[in-house]
Amino acid sequence: MRRLLRWFLFSITAIFLALAGAVVLAIDDQATVNRAVEFTPENVARAKRILDMNDPRKLKPGEGRRISLSEEDFDLMVNYLANRYGHGGARILLKRGAVFITTSVLLPNTTLRRFLNVDAALIATDGLPRFEHLRIGRLPVPAWLADWVLVRAVARLQEDEDYAFATNVIKNVSFADGRIGVVYEWQSDLPDKVRTDLLSRASQERLRVYQECLAEASGSLPAKNVSLTELMVPLFRLVQERSGGGDPIAENRAAIFVLTLYVNGTDMATLLPAAKDWQSPTAHHVTLNGRDDFPKHFMVSAALAAGAGGPLSDAVGLYKEVEDSRSDDSRSGSGFSFNDIAADRAGTRFGELAAASPISARNLQQQLSAAVGERALMPATDDLPEFMSEAEFKRRFGGVSAPAFNSMMAEIERRIAALPLYR
């Protein structure tokens, strides 16, 4: 009996020590991948082309489609996700039917900065990819064990209604030299599933609350033309009230999202089926600094920055201006415009502050809950060049990233930084 007890205690101790050793080997105090996220207008243009080619309105139920991404685009996407959600970085290499992944993720809730560094290679098969090798920190993981975990993880996702649609839609993933291919099967009810499942009940309830607040605020304004601040102030007074014992960042994001849809004339029900029964706001002509295009630039950039990060917001805004410069019809408001860029950059800064941290989120709420004017959101831009054709833009500023362009961008940033709201 004593021998059995000693063996039991020895086994428990050995298992504990083995697990502790594995944790020590798996966790590092430095990240092996530390890369900034850099989007360019060209990245956005390629993403738009991919989305256009896979427009749901052109797809039939049961129809299979294949999306092909270059190594550069896939690397950018994975690095962005690692940076955005793991406060780390990633690097991707595609070759010989395999994908090589190196990523670093900052571990949450630790007093000291500790990282999970992963080095893996996955080989394409007719079904799930399989591991060629996997190393977590200094801990090598057997490929068979990594494959077993991957199979179990996918099985668990398929049991969860919130994620099952994704595993049912994606049919195959393949790797070739420099490209990754994803074969998926379109389902007629997929849009509603995605829109509903990607938003938790709590998130949907936040949207409903701010939609009703916006409906009340817009209904109380008799004028057809209203300032963006006339809608934003009452909305953020409610945001501040609801953030008292809750998540200020989540409240900010929900209010920004509702206001973004409104100024762009998009019905919430087109994105969220449940919203068809919600109270609808009264339609108004929304302006900022006397123009109706500035609120759209400002709010779209704010929503992108609050939900996806500043680099993506900047790239989308710049892409829009580059595309506009290729249209010579100045009467339609097309052409490269630095004042539109100023609205984009002010909105980006607004969105960044709204989601940077709980302290930053609450500080923004406090300032916006008071009566603020339009100059609190965006600086004067009347003297900035606008409506330039592509040829004129290149002649005067040399193109994107040229010294004259960078000088003008620095001036815009200086004006925005001078506003008390963004200090």
Image (cartoon, helix red, strand yellow):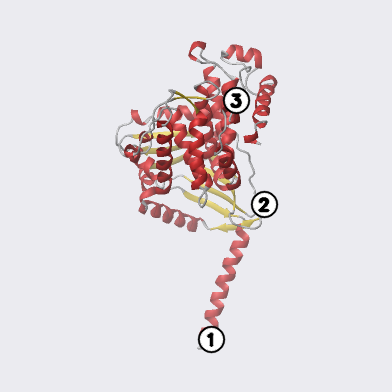
Report which residue position mark 2 lands on: 30
Q: Is residue 198 visible?
A: no
User: Which residue is more in the foreground, 189 or 287?
Assistant: 287
Give above or below for 262 relative to 408. below
User: Which residue is more in the foreground, 369 or 270?
Assistant: 369
Give above or below for 286 relative to 123. above
Residue type at mark 3 is Ala
| Discs 3/1, front | 3
User: Of the residues under marks 2 and 1, which one precedes in the sequence?
Assistant: 1
Report which residue position mark 3 lands on: 342
- Whether pointer 3 and pointer 1 mark residues with C-beta atoms closer than 8 Å, the reply is no
- Whether pointer 2 and pointer 1 mark residues with C-beta atoms closer than 8 Å, the reply is no
- Neighbours of disc 1 within 10 Å: few (<14), some (14-19), many (20+): few
Q: Quadrant of the C terminus?
A: top right
Left or right: 293 as drawn, with respect to 113? left
Residue type at mark 2 is Gln
Report which residue position mark 1 lands on: 3
**Between marks 3 and 1, how big is the CA–CA gap?**
77 Å
Q: Position of residue 314 (x, y in %)?
A: 58, 30
Q: Is residue 253 visible?
A: yes
What residue is at 66 percent from the left and 32 percent from the top?
Answer: 417
User: Of the residues under marks 3 and 2, which one precedes in the sequence?
Assistant: 2
Is disc 3 placed on a helix, strand or loop? Answer: helix
User: Of the residues under marks 3 and 1, which one precedes in the sequence?
Assistant: 1
| Discs 3/2, front | 3
**Between marks 3 and 2, how big is the CA–CA gap?**
37 Å
Q: Position of residue 262 (x, y in %)?
A: 43, 31
